[in-house]
Image (cartoon, rainbow, N blue to C red):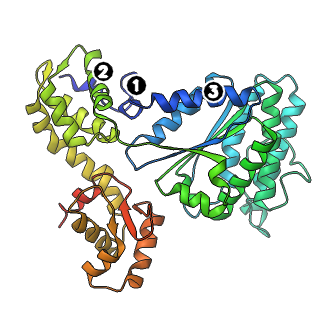
Amino acid sequence: MDPVRNPFAPGAGQRPPELAGRDREVDAFDVVLERVARGRPERSLVLTGLRGVGKTVLLGELRSMAVKRGWGAGKVEARPEAGLRRPLSAALHRAIRDLAVRHRAPDRVEEVLAVLKAFVLKANPDGAKLRDRWQPGIDVPAAQGRADSGDIEIDLVELFTEVAELAADVGTGIALLIDEMQDVQPADVSALCAACHELSQSGAPLVVVGAGLPHLPAVLSASKSYSERLFRYVRIDRLARSEADRAVVAPIEREDAEITPAALDALFTISGGYPYFVQSYGKATWDAAVRAEIGDEDVRLAAPEAETELAVGFFGSRYERATPAEREYLRAMAELVEGRDEPAPTASIAEYLERRPSSLSPARDSLIKKGLVYSGERGLIAFTVPHFGRYLLTQE
């Protein structure tokens, strides 16, 4: 097969494996856009799932859908230990520019930009020298007395209100997409929930779409008890067999090639139906195949190459972030679940390591913050990365 035309290479083909089987989520978001644009009440959306199931790609697709319908749309990737004001302001600035080309009153656009600038300037530390103060690229003076109190909860409500009203002027809305939402700091999570609550009460055309790890609902609930009423939670999981097959067959057929049922069996078994792995093993198999019909022997020959790439780029990059104590904890988890994608009891990990449970809390908490593990329920801990336990068992 021609590696230059590999249909599984990133960016190749018309629809990547990460979007196979996501028609339900895409159709549901289309309904959300329509309802909000018509002034009808609608909850914001939260996508949860393990790494490798395509949440980020799906988030990008939802953003594209909003833009195609004339909405202002901006995307944020949350980072641990980083505040939300700056990245949120950059995302909303992008959304406002989307709307500005359709708005008939430039002065009104500048008024909203002034409020946005006032909001983001509060990200500068008090007492910072002029040369150390960050300036956003907004060429209007900052507003006074609007979104500039310094209280993120108050300011975010006021900012969202202004931006949503601007969108209403042109008959559309605002979509704010937040990736890695579990990494948003507690005070900012609380502010987001409060702002979503306020706008849902008024029917303002602004929707937040968050994506994060499986414990994200617990993060939101811990911030505001009413968060479960604010968001519609959608679990993004591995692909069903039929969806995984479609993700493989469609790009192959576009290149006038074929794949045998035995090869599809082998690809599904080795990938587990996780979209990222479907793409990784599919890419390696295409490169290994020498005939226009891909067989299970091609999958077998390609597997080591795919696993080497995954070990470096997908697993290894995460494993390297762990300290020796954290690696010991991870290895114990892998041993207890025998490499399977299932949770391990924290009490059993302590027993396995012959340590007091309390002495392992720092390592566990740090691994949660690094996004390597999560706790879906009390007393259990699981890997955020599919097949990570299997990978760890291969490490010396």
Residue 202 position (above or below residue 297): below
In x, y percent, where is residue 1? 17, 22
- Viewer-side residue, 139 vs 319: 319
Depicted 77 relative to depicted 96: above or below: below
Numbered label tally:
3
Residue at x 29%, y 68% (from the top left corner): 333
Position of residue 191 in the picture relative to residue 2 (left or right): right
Residue 132: % across, % down: 72, 62
Q: Residue at x 20, y 17 (%)?
A: 257
Q: CA distance from mark 2 to mark 1?
A: 9 Å
Q: Is residue 130 visible?
A: yes
**Residue marked by disc 2:** 250
Left or right: 290 in relation to 60: left
- Kindly indicate whether the residue at mark 2 contacts the one at mark 3 (C-beta within 8 angstroms): no
Q: List the single residue furthest toward the left.
A: 297
Residue holding disc 3:
67
Crowding at dot 2, Cα within 10 Å, few <14 / some 14-19 / many 20+, comes out as some
